[in-house]
Amino acid sequence: MARHNLSTVVSFEVTRTLTKRRFWITSMIGPVLLAVIIALVVSSNTATSNRVDSQKNARFTFVYSDASGFVNPTVANAMGGSKAADPAKAIADVKAGRSGAYFEYPSNPAKQTTKVYGADNGIFENGKYSALATELLVASARAKIGNLATLAQGNFPVVATTYKAGQESGGIADVIPPLMFLVIFYLVLVVLGNQMLTSLLEEKENRVTEMILTTLDPTTLVIGKVISLFIIGLVQMVVFAVPVLVGYVFFRTPLGLPLLDLSGLLAHPGSMVIGALLLAGGLILFTATLVAAGAIMPTAKEAGQVFAVLMTTIFVPFYVVSVVVSDPGSFIVQVFTYFPYTAPVTAMLRNGFGSLSVLQSTIVIVELFGLGIVVLRLAVRLFRYGSIEYSKKVSLKAAFGKRE
């Protein structure tokens, strides 16, 4: 019967939330704004790229003078240029419309200004003169120094091999996979944190908790609400992820996004299992704490203060992330590793960077699961007692002083 009640609670909560217009409006605001931003960026980048290409491809006859000796005559001729015999006459020809443009290269183009003269074709078209003058000098330099141009720009392959405990390590490829659990942890709390806090407050504020508890066991109700929250959160994350994936797959080049090559990532079974258990334990603890806070507080406004404190604790370890990476044995890192509400983030960071031992991870995982279950049972008791407290916070002393 309890199992049937649990499925009923989950089904009711999920259906009630997903059929609300407000839920979909709120969930779609982010994706719609992201889609609009992607469209604007793609449109802007495409227009800019087309304008630059048109300026580069807009070939016209020009003359030039070269005091530096860097300009390659062959390259200049291929671009439609010829050397000017008289700079003053070249400028006069441009003014009279007899010449397309005149480029005057100084003796030291790296430090002195290259002067460009051309007809005024509008603010957007005038850039073609500078673009062609720059392209000519760059092409001439590359033709002269060959591969040195590529080397000077740092465009050459380098492969680094590092070793840890006598074994070849994967470097960043080892770090990324276990740290994905930390990303999931933050996403879940950001998306679901406020709903976790207010999951029990809605019934209290609507004054229907006594009626609900006549047909449902408080434990079943609380667990059902927690499960439904994760289902709803999964729906929200999928809704938000779709435009991100679409933007990356179809508009990666216009957006200037790098190509992600996941083939080099190394997912070691040990660190991945530890990361998954730390994620599960951390979510259980924080969910139970937020639900318990919601059971104590009479209104969502007062409960929001607890939410702010808890959200602060998950970001505190990042203030010492350099110490977590460079000196994981320091006192402050040890405190953050074992203090329950900073433990999930700190332990997942250390697990990703390979400084969390099996013994340490076992202690933290047991701590998170154990305390999470205790707090969840506490939340059930507080909700049972607090269901009749509508105007003030539930007294812990009174709640635990009452007999079941």
Image: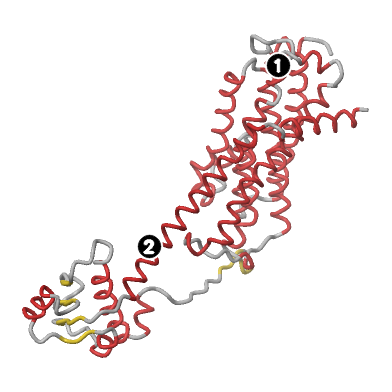
Closest to the observer: 223 or 53?
53
Does 92 sit above or below residue 31? below
- What is the tally of numbered marks visible in this picture? 2
Give the quarter of the image for residue 239: top right
Based on the displayed image, in which of its 4 quarters is residue 126 positioned?
bottom left
- Observer-nearest of 223 and 367: 223
Q: Which residue is mark 2?
A: 48
x and y percent of residue 18 in the render?
Answer: 71, 35
- Kindly identify the residue that appears in the image at 74 percent across and 37 percent down: 369
Of circles 1 and 2, the one toward us is: 2
**Amino acid under label 2?**
Thr
For the point 52% across and 71% down, which residue is it?
Answer: 160
Q: Quadrant of the C terminus?
A: top right
Residue 404 in the image: above or below residue 260: above
Question: Between residues 156 and 343, which one lies in front from this camera angle?
Answer: 156
Residue 234 is situated, as x and y percent measured from the top left of the image, at 70, 43
Cα–Cα span, label 1 and label 2 = 56 Å
Q: Residue at x 28, y 62 (%)?
A: 124
- Residue 328 in percent (x, y) is at 56, 48
The circle on residue 204 is: 1
Residue positioned 70% across, 16% down in the render: 204
